[in-house]
Image (tube, rainbow, N blue to C red):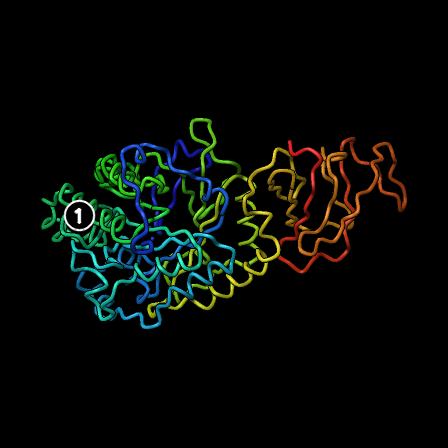
Amino acid sequence: MTTTSADDASTAPSTADGAAAVPGAPAATSASEASAAPDTTWFTHDRFGMFVHWGLYSLAARHEWVKNRERLTDEQYQVYFDHFEPDRYDPVRWARAAKAAGMRYVVLTTKHHDGFCLWDSALTEYKVTKTPHGRDLVGPFVEACRAEGLKVGFYHSLIDWHHPSFPVDGTHPQRDDEEFKAAAADRDIREYQRYLHGQVRELLTEYGRIDYLFFDFSYAGRPEWWGGKGPDDWDATRLLAMVRELQPHILVNDRAGLPGDFVTPEQYQPSGPMTADGRPVLWEACQTLNGSWGYDRDNLDHKSPDLLVRMLVDGVSKGGNLLLNVGPTGRGDLDPRDTAALEEIGRWTDLHERSVRGCGPSAFTPPADCRYTQRGDRLYVHLFAWPLRHLHLPGLEGRVRHAQLLNDASEIVRLPPAPDRPAMNTQMGGQPAGTLTLQLPVRRPDTPVPVIELFLTDPS
């Protein structure tokens, strides 16, 4: 993957890294359905998904851009193709781990930038069915997700370092090999377009209903990559029209270089709700557990579970989703470090799910070290830091019927307002008029982010 936008999505170039459904599932194709805007309700309700980066680079185990970073030729990279045999691949375990963590959709890399395909594409020999594994990986993934009630998403790279018609540019592993560049000088992007469109058509017709599509990525005009490519190179207008025709309900991101159904900040948390031309947009932050998308054996820079929970809450409080990545090993197992993090997140979501699921931003302003999410008349106070005894909530006095800790439904006492009371010795001073003061227990609940559930008298 790579990075996308700043907080204003209207100015952001689209780039990144980072993916069918049950056979026989319906795929609407009528012109009337194709012209209708897709329903985003499930996306803004579910809020939390799993990204899965998996492919030949998992055998190298040193980042999914290893071919680019180490300037490997196709011949040097072939060793991973020749030894790709994920004998422990069990997508049911993946799906159950995602569901237990509180995730409600899963996105798989069908093809990453190295061009290797996880399905039996009729358009190439560079695919899993030609490796020692010899079997399609996408179909079992889709079936496992559907069996667990999870939405299915595909990631698909727009660039391809293996395809013979993909013009060499600043992202290509052999960008500094003058002899190779000279031999590739007449490559025609239009031939690659036909391949790209054909593979997307395969993915959207062979696996039934697909809920989500993550293209990656457009980089025209990016100064760090000469010869960058964008929507014209992908024939993105026609590509997206085909996607909408084949799967009218599908949600598509913004990285083909044209506006999509949602925008995709990567590896950072937006400072507030995201907008385009001054209007709110749907957004989803895609984040890694350790800075690498693919399996990276020696990378020890793992985010703590409490930080990951705070990232999820922070995003929902600003109207966004979290797509959290795992990078399975070359044998197909989830990294034990990833599994441990998911289990910790799951312990939090098991008790606090309703503070994020179906929630969004609140019009009320939280105090420092807190985040608000709201659903109807329920306002959720997420405490990133646990205060001593008292929590002061501006503007909420007289607007709360009941307050409780979400983890055990134990009541939180509300203190009567006394804005004119002076502070002295052991007496707390009064707070500004309109402030609701809650009296908290001294010991915080044993959870990464405690949550207080407030029942409002008026949700507005």
Percent x, y for residue 395? Answer: 72, 33
Q: So how many labels did they put on this image? A: 1
Q: Quarter-wise, where is residue 344 in the image?
A: bottom right
- Give the image location of residue 60, x and y in percent: 31, 66
Image quarter for residue 304? bottom right
x, y percent for residue 277: 43, 27
Outermost residue on the right side: it is 425
Q: Which of 395 and 422 is in front in this view?
A: 395
Residue 136 sits above or below residue 199 on the image: below
Query: Looking at the rendering, in which quadrant would you find the C terminus?
Result: top right
**Which residue is more in the foreground, 223 or 125?**
125
Residue at image position (57%, 55%) is 349
Residue that sits furthest to the top in the current view: 278
Q: In which quarter of the image is residue 317?
A: top right
Secondary element at tag 1: helix
322 or 160: which is nearer to us?
A: 322
Q: Which of 411 and 183 is in front in this view?
A: 411
Whether residue 19 sits left or right of residue 41 in the image: it is left
In this image, 265 relative to 421: left or right? left
**Residue 50 in the image: x percent, y percent?**
43, 54
Instruction: Write the residue at 27% across / 71% down.
Output: 85
Farthest residue toward the bottom?
87
Residue tagged 1: 195
